[in-house]
Amino acid sequence: MRSAPTGSVAVAGATVRFGPSAAHTGAVSDSLRRVLVVLAVLVGLAGVVFAFTLVDTDDGTNDVAVTDAGPVEQLIPPRGSEILRQEAVGVDLRPGWTGVLVINGVEIPEDQVDAANLASLGQLLYTAGDGKAIERFEAGENCVTAVVWRVEESRADSRDVSWCFNVT
């Protein structure tokens, strides 16, 4: 197969260039486009794989497994666990966080959480009892939402952490 001649010719003061056909140069663009699409797909897949490596999992003893220094270190009790009616419920917060508990749709008043544990250990805990917002946990599934925010911010900047557990 002979290759097409290339070059230029001066015609009436204008230069006319000739060389590979437009169809041939389009084929190169199509090949380049295919390579770029394949590379983009591979980069996208690598990004997804990298994102999954950032997710931290655990053995189930601590439901909240985070790598970004989120507000909650541990759910008490862990999600899906079984507890007795008199056990404490709440969250172990990272330093610099505070919040409130909402249990089965009832917000627990600040004066009914364990203030000593909150101040010393950063644990926002509630134990049901006579005369309290929730006197006893009902048998079966009970759900908690910890509404948490940084101590230097307000509740308007809060995050919700929700989970459920079973009472026997």
Image (spheres, helix red, strand yellow):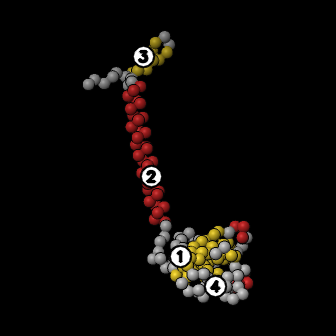
Query: CB under 8 Å between callouts 4 and 3?
Result: no
**Foreground residue, 123 or 44?**
123
Q: Earlier in the sequence, mark 2 or mark 3?
A: 3
- The secondary structure type at the circle numbered 4 is loop
Gap in angstroms between the C-alphas marked 1 and 2: 36 Å
Lower sequence index among marks 4 and 3: 3
Q: Give the left or right position of residue 65, taking residue 154 as reference.
A: left
Question: In terms of image quadrants, where is residue 97?
Answer: bottom right
Q: Which residue is mark 3?
A: 9
CA separation in Å, label 3 and label 1: 81 Å
Amino acid residing under circle 4: Arg
Judge depth for marks 3 and 1 and give the one in front: 1
Please state the horizontal and vertical placement of residue 98, each as a whole percent of the image.
67, 77
What residue does disc 2 label? 43
Q: Does label 4 or label 2 sit earlier along the sequence? A: 2
Q: Earlier in the sequence, mark 1 or mark 2?
A: 2
Question: Where in the figure is residue 23, as x and y percent of width and height?
Answer: 39, 26
Q: Say which residue appears at 46% left-offset and 61% top-offset.
A: 50
For marks 4 and 2, give the CA distance.
54 Å
Which one is earlier in the sequence, the residue at label 4 or at label 1?
1
Q: Position of residue 18 (x, y in %)?
A: 40, 21
Instruction: Residue 118: tell me if it is visible.
Output: no
Tag of residue 79 = 1
Say which of marks 1 and 2 sits in front: 1
Q: From the viewer's perspective, tell me whether residue 91 is left or right of residue 45.
A: right
Nearer to us: label 4 or label 3: 4
Q: Determine crowd level at label 1: few under 14, some 14-19, many 20+ residues with C-alpha closer than 10 A.
A: some
- Measured in 3D between alpha carbons, the distance from the residue under mark 2 to the one under mark 3, in whole angstroms, is 46 Å
- Numbered label tally: 4
The residue to which callout 4 is attached is 136
